[in-house]
Image (cartoon, rainbow, N blue to C red):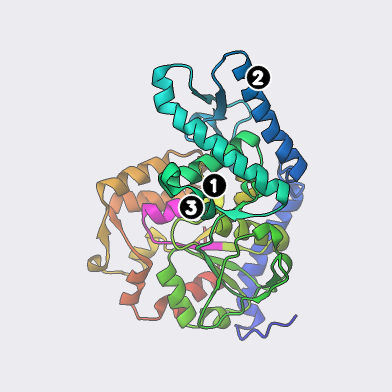
Amino acid sequence: MAFAPMGPEASFFKALDQHRASLLASLRRGGGEPAGGRSPPASSSEVLASIENIIQNIITSLARNEAPVFTIENRSSWENIKFEDSVGLQMVSHCTMRKIRSDSPKSIKIFGKKISLILKILSMIYKLVQSNTYATKRDIYYTDSQFFGNQTVVDNVINDISCMLKVPRRCLHILSTSKGLIAGNLKYIEEDGTKVNCTCGATAVSVPSNIQGLKNLITDAKFLLIVEKDATFQRLLDDNFCNKMAPCIMVTGKGVPDLNTRLLVKKLWDIFHIPIFTLVDADPHGIEIMCIYKYGSVSMSFEAHNLTVPAIRWLGLLPSDIKRLHIPKESLIPLTKHDQMKLDSILKRPYITCQPFWRKEMEIMAESKMKAEIQSLAFLSSDYLSRVYLPNKLKFGGWI
């Protein structure tokens, strides 16, 4: 291994090694890939055939003087979601559908533009797949920004198409610009042959846009730490955390993670099966972000097997840490009405029933009506997070 770790002695990682052994034993008991696991990615010919089939159906409808209709899974309804502890939130096989039609003046006004959007982007996808080229979502938006209106419209249509064709977005040859960062004991080669070394320094490496194309990934990391916020991630870099705790990897999605950051975390888990922990604010928004990495989201549930990592554990900041560390009330922030609604929503989700320790922490937050940012630890000392809090948590198994 070409890494030169400067981290703690081997005895420091005893709890982490035991945790990893437990994760591997659990995987063996479950037979590795969970039931109903991922199928191989769709080939280019299969994607092209699926698009041709959609167009053929439209032509058939028009030949019969019938208005075209798109039938798409309802990605925003909890009714279409089932929860499995080994996978997370995934779309049920027989879910409720929504129809996008244009067979009346009213529906033309509401859905006519939507059908046009789907057809336009389908034609672009067909050309990309046929020519074996790639484009970003931003590229697609700027081909006709006036027609699309805004980037969110493009993003939603692409996700609808991915769901409708039942293929991952990368099989559509559409990439998204990554906002995430990665640092630590990791090396890999990108699809174009570029060699990347993420070994921790003062700066991090941007998460690649084509995760599927990564090859020759090498690491001897003992753990992967997902950091919610960029500011905290940069502070840990400044404190030389990666080297002090080497060998390890740090990742941040800079808030709500983009698809590439989630794909990278999933890829690292699938290949190396190292313990993965989250460091988020002790507030409902931070917990929501952690849940996205671990169990996925409703809107992307159709791709859960490619994105979720249920083995992720909550390292901090725990609401119970606030009292345990005697963080003063002046460093805390009252929960807003929106925070309380978000917390109530999370507590009702199906995965909380199998996470009693998470529930207890959220109940502590609800009872105190207060939240805390990771930066509140600076009250104890400016480097308390990297020098004391995280090392102790990792050494003594302070995760849930």
Circle 3: element type: helix
Taking the spot 48% from the left edge, 52% from the top edge, the residue there is: 142
Please give the residue where the numbered disc 3 appears in the rendered image: 142
The Cα–Cα distance between marks 1 and 3, rounded to whole angstroms, is 29 Å
Circle 1: element type: loop
- Left or right: where 309 falls relative to 398: right
Please give the residue where the numbered disc 1 appears in the rendered image: 296
Q: In front here: 332 or 152?
A: 152
The Cα–Cα distance between marks 2 and 3, rounded to whole angstroms, is 32 Å
Please give the residue where the numbered disc 2 appears in the rendered image: 60
Quadrant in which the N terminus is drawn: bottom right
Q: Earlier in the sequence, mark 2 or mark 1?
A: 2
Q: Which residues are magenta?
A: 277-290
Image vertical order of residue 80 relative to residue 209, above or below: above
Q: Nearer the viewer, mark 2 or mark 1?
A: 2
Does the magenta segment cover residue 281?
yes
Badge 3, how many Cα within 10 Å: few under 14, some, many 20+?
A: few
* Residue type of the residue flagged with mark 1: Gly
Q: Earlier in the sequence, mark 1 or mark 3?
A: 3
Q: Nearer the viewer, mark 1 or mark 3?
A: 3
The Cα–Cα distance between marks 2 and 1, rounded to whole angstroms, is 38 Å
- Left or right: where 105 falls relative to 98: left
* Residue type of the residue flagged with mark 3: Tyr
Taking the spot 60% from the left edge, 39% from the top edge, the residue there is: 122
Taking the spot 54% from the left edge, 47% from the top edge, the residue there is: 296
* Residue type of the residue flagged with mark 2: Thr
